[in-house]
Image (cartoon, rainbow, N blue to C red):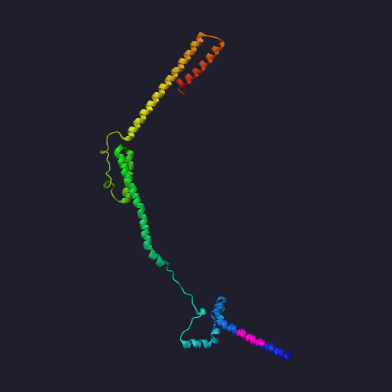
Amino acid sequence: MRFTGTVLAVLFANLLTIALLSGAYYYLQSDHGQMMLYEMGLHSLFIPALGSSGSNIDEQVFQNGFTQQRLSDMKPMTVNPRSSTSTSQSSPSNRVSQASQERKPNLSAIRSSLEMCRFWNAEYRKDGSSQSKQYRDAACTRYERFSGRDSSNVVNLASSSSVSSIPSYQEREERRKRRLEEQRKAEEKAEHEEYCQGLSEEIDHYDSLLRRGGSGYYVARWRRERREVSLEYSRKCLLGQ
C-alpha cells in the first residue's frame, strides 16, 4: 500500500508539472505573455524557443498567407510633429494681426499730433509768443514724422508776419500783473506811512503829558507807554522791520 501511494503521488506530481508547463507555454504564446516577457526583458531568450516549438502555428499562417505581427516583433513608430506646418499656416494670420496692431498706434499718434499741431498753431496766431511757436513746431514735426506728409498741406501755418501786432495775451497778462503789483505796493506804502505818522503823533502826545506833569503813578505809566511806542516806531518806521 505504501509503494502504491508513492507511485500515485509521483504520477500526480508529473501530471501537475505537465499541466503547469502546458499552461505556461500557451500563456507565453499569447499577447499578454509576450508583453510580460517584453517588460521583463526576457523576450529575446524565450521567443526563439517558443517560435521553434510552434511549427504548427507557422504552417497554418503560411497556408492562410497572412501573418499577424506579434507585440514582440513590433518596432517603435516615429511620429513627426506637425508644429512646423501649423506654425507656417498660422504665420500669415499672425503677421496680419501684428501689422494691424502696429497700424493702430500709428493712426492714434498721427491723429493726436495733428490736433496738437492745429491747436498750437491757433494759439500762436492769437498771441504770437515764442513759446506757442515752439510748441507748434514740435507738434507739427511729430505729425510729419508719423504720417510722412507735410504739415503745411493740412494746417495753415501762421507766420510771424501774419501774427497780429497787438499785444499778445501773455503780454497783456504780464502788464496787468505789473499794474496790480505796483498798486499793491503803493497801498502798502501809504498804509505804512499812515501807521508811522500815527506812532509819531502818539509819541508827541506822551511828551505833552510828561511836560505837563502829574502824580508819580501817571508819570511812570506815561513814560513806560511812551518807551513802548518809541521802540515800535524805531523798529517799524526807521529800521523797516
Is 193 covered by the magenta stretch? no
Residue 130 x/y as whole percent: 32, 38
Compared across the picture, whether 38 is left or right of 107 comes to right
Residue 35 x/y as whole percent: 54, 77
Looking at the image, is 154 positioned above or below residue 190? Answer: below
Identity of the residue drawn at 57% across and 81% down: 27
Residue 12 x/y as whole percent: 66, 87
Looking at the image, is 126 positioned above or below residue 216? Answer: below
Task: State how many labels appear.
Answer: 0
Residue 10's image quarter?
A: bottom right
Compared across the picture, whether 117 is left or right of 65 comes to left
Identity of the residue drawn at 32% across and 43% down: 119
Identity of the residue drawn at 56% across and 77% down: 36
Which region shows up in magenta?
12-21
Identity of the residue drawn at 52% across and 16% down: 225
Q: Chief secondary structure of the magenta span?
A: helix
Residue 15's image quarter?
A: bottom right
Is 16 covered by the magenta stretch? yes
Task: Between residue 108 and residue 78, name the one nearer to us.
Answer: 108
The N terminus is located in which quarter?
bottom right
Looking at the image, is 85 positioned above or below residue 201? Answer: below
Residue 33's image quarter?
A: bottom right
Residue 123 x/y as whole percent: 31, 40
Determine the residue located farthest toward the right in the rendered image. Answer: 2
Determine the residue located farthest toward the left in the rendered image. Answer: 161
